[in-house]
């Protein structure tokens, strides 16, 4: 997996979080992003495949 150097994602960026969950950023807030889940290799379940992730809890994929 290749990560971009920047910390904060932009709309449309692909992110990785929770050791196995990937998603696409739909909205950027001051402290978090709203993400549509595209891949989930964990036992976690997300209502309607959308979740909120704090900026400190994800990495932007290249």
Image (tube, grey):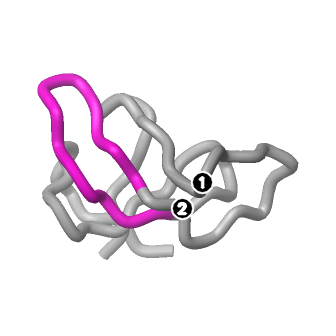
Asked whether residue 40 is drawn in magenta, I would say no
Quarter-wise, where is residue 61 in the image?
Answer: bottom left
* Residue sitting farthest toward the right: 43
Is the C-beta separation of discs 1 and 2 under 8 Å? no
Q: Is residue 30 above or below residue 1?
A: above
Q: Is residue 48 above or below residue 4?
A: above
Q: CA distance from mark 1 to mark 2?
A: 9 Å
What numbered label is drawn on residue 48? Answer: 1
- Image check: 41 left or right of 56? right
Q: Position of residue 38 (x, y in %)?
A: 55, 71
Main SS, magenta region, reads strand
Query: Which quadrant, please, contains the C terminus?
Result: bottom left
Q: Is residue 58 above or below residue 60?
A: above
The answer to which of marks 1 and 2 sits earlier in the sequence is: 2
Q: Position of residue 28 (x, y in %)?
A: 17, 43
Mark 2 secondary-structure assignment: strand
| Mark 2, residue position | 37
Q: How many marks?
A: 2
- Image check: 47 left or right of 58? right
* Residue at 40% over, 52% down: 35
Q: Position of residue 51 (x, y in %)?
A: 49, 42
Q: Residues within 10 Å of mark 2 (few under 14, many from 20)?
A: many
Span shown in magenta: 23-35
């Amino acid at each position: 997996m290749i990560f971009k150097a920047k910390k904060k994602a932009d709309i449309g960026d692909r992110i990785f979080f929770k050791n196995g969950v990937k998603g696409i950023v739909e909205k950027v807030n001051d402290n978090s992003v709203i993400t549509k889940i595209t891949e989930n290799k964990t036992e976690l379940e997300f209502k309607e495949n959308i979740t909120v992730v704090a900026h400190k809890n994800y990495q932007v994929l290249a």
